[in-house]
Image: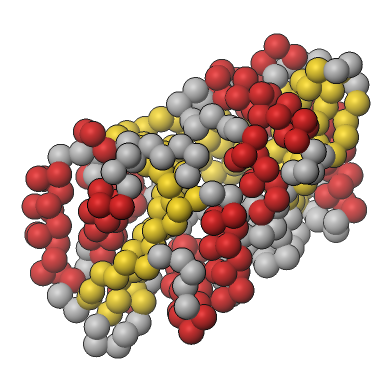
């Protein structure tokens, strides 16, 4: 058994990781977008917002049978390390996951982190591994998918028209990146409303959004080959940004979209802006991305408000994913 780090420049390792991740997904979550070398290079070079994870491959002989990664942030939650561990279905229960966990714990300690997070689809293998190693279930998230061919456009247009009178003081604006420098602070303030979303029993501090982080997120998305669409709601009397919906489309798989964010700031809730933003985004995507077929989204299972909006829009449940947490030691 040999565990070594790799970088996005190590294309043979990225290719081995790609095959491994797809083999795991075929068992745990076959509905998910298949990984490619291009997507993997982008993930490990840029991350979500310029803080990419550090990946490792575990090989037995010449065969990659497992992988792991550690991600830490300098923006917030400076005590946390997020770990990912995946073992090929044909090679589980042989100690490989434990070996990766030991290595990642040591790296978390070296980085000065004291709390560990990890995620797994709701499977016997994933839950069994987490609980055996002292992780506790802290948050359930539901993966949902909207199939655009099944959307009742006439019904949504009626709902849109019915919601408009409740938002008479607001205008929806289509923004494509890069966001002008003078608007970054406003976007950061608006984005921080995501901290109101449920985190259930996680020991997790509010995320800190700065203009620099907004710019890093946009640049990382573009560098990873995601076309980004940001629809914002502006409060006309004050000019404040009241909410947003952000969707990205995968440039190497034009049929796939991902919902990255939908938030409404606290002072502007109760005007049906969430529904208007989501339907308004569908209108925009129908014009800009005619090949788009599906949009995936994730919500905490306890987020009743956003789940209600998504169910109105025809999203269907695909799977449940658990976030686990434990102290480092």
Q: Quadrant of residue 171?
A: bottom left
Left of 156 or right of it: where is 118? right
Nearest the viewer among 171 and 82 is 171
Q: Quadrant of the C terminus?
A: top right
Left of 131 or right of it: where is 158? left
The residue lying at 38 percent from left, 37 percent from top is 255
Image vertical order of residue 87 relative to residue 108, above or below? above
Q: Quadrant of residue 139?
A: top right
Where is residue 229? Give x, y as percent.
39, 58
Where is residue 33? Give x, y as percent.
50, 32
The residue lying at 13 percent from left, 66 percent from top is 164
Nearest the viewer among 99 and 221 is 221
Left of 158 or right of it: where is 18? right
Image vertical order of residue 18 relative to residue 137, above or below? above
Where is residue 2? Give x, y as percent.
91, 26
Residue 232 in sight from this viewpoint = yes
Q: Quadrant of residue 17?
A: top right
Image vertical order of residue 45 relative to residue 218, above or below? above
Q: Residue furthest bottom?
A: 238
Where is residue 38? Give x, y as percent.
62, 39
The residue lying at 84 percent from left, 23 percent from top is 59
Q: Residue furthest top?
A: 90
The residue lying at 58 percent from left, 62 percent from top is 219
Q: Quadrant of the N terminus?
A: top right
Image vertical order of residue 157 relative to residue 131, above or below? below
Residue 116 in sight from this viewpoint = no
Nearest the viewer among 263 and 60 is 60
């Amino acid at each position: 058994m040999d565990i070594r780090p790799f970088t996005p420049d190590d294309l043979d390792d990225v290719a081995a990781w790609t095959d491994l991740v797809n083999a795991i997904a075929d068992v745990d979550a076959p509905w998910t977008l298949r990984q490619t070398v291009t997507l993997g290079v982008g993930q490990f070079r840029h991350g979500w917002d310029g803080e990419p994870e550090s990946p490792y491959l575990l090989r037995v002989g010449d065969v990659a049978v497992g992988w792991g990664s550690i991600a830490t942030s300098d923006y917030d939650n400076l005590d946390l390390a997020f770990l990912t561990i995946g073992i090929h279905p044909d090679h589980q229960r042989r100690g490989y996951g434990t070996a990766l966990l030991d290595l990642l714990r040591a790296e978390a300690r070296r980085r000065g982190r004291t709390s560990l997070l990890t995620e797994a689809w709701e499977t016997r293998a994933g839950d069994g591994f987490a609980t055996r190693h002292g992780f506790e279930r802290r948050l359930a998230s539901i993966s949902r998918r909207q199939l655009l061919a099944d959307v009742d456009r006439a019904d949504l247009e009626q709902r849109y028209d019915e919601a408009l009178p409740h938002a008479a003081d607001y205008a929806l604006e289509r923004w494509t990146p890069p966001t002008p420098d003078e608007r970054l602070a406003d976007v950061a303030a608006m984005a921080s409303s995501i901290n109101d979303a449920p985190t259930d029993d996680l020991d997790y501090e509010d995320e800190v959004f700065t203009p620099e982080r907004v710019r890093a997120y946009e640049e990382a998305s573009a560098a990873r080959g995601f076309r980004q669409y940001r629809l914002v709601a502006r409060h006309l009397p004050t000019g404040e940004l009241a909410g947003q919906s952000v969707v990205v489309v995968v440039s190497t798989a034009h049929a796939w979209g991902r919902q990255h964010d939908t938030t409404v700031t606290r002072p502007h809730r109760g005007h049906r802006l969430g529904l208007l933003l989501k339907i308004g985004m569908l209108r925009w995507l129908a014009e800009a991305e005619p090949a788009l077929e599906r949009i995936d989204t994730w919500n905490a299972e306890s987020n009743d408000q956003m789940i209600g909006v998504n169910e109105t829009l025809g999203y269907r449940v695909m799977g449940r994913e658990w976030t686990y947490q434990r102290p480092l030691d």
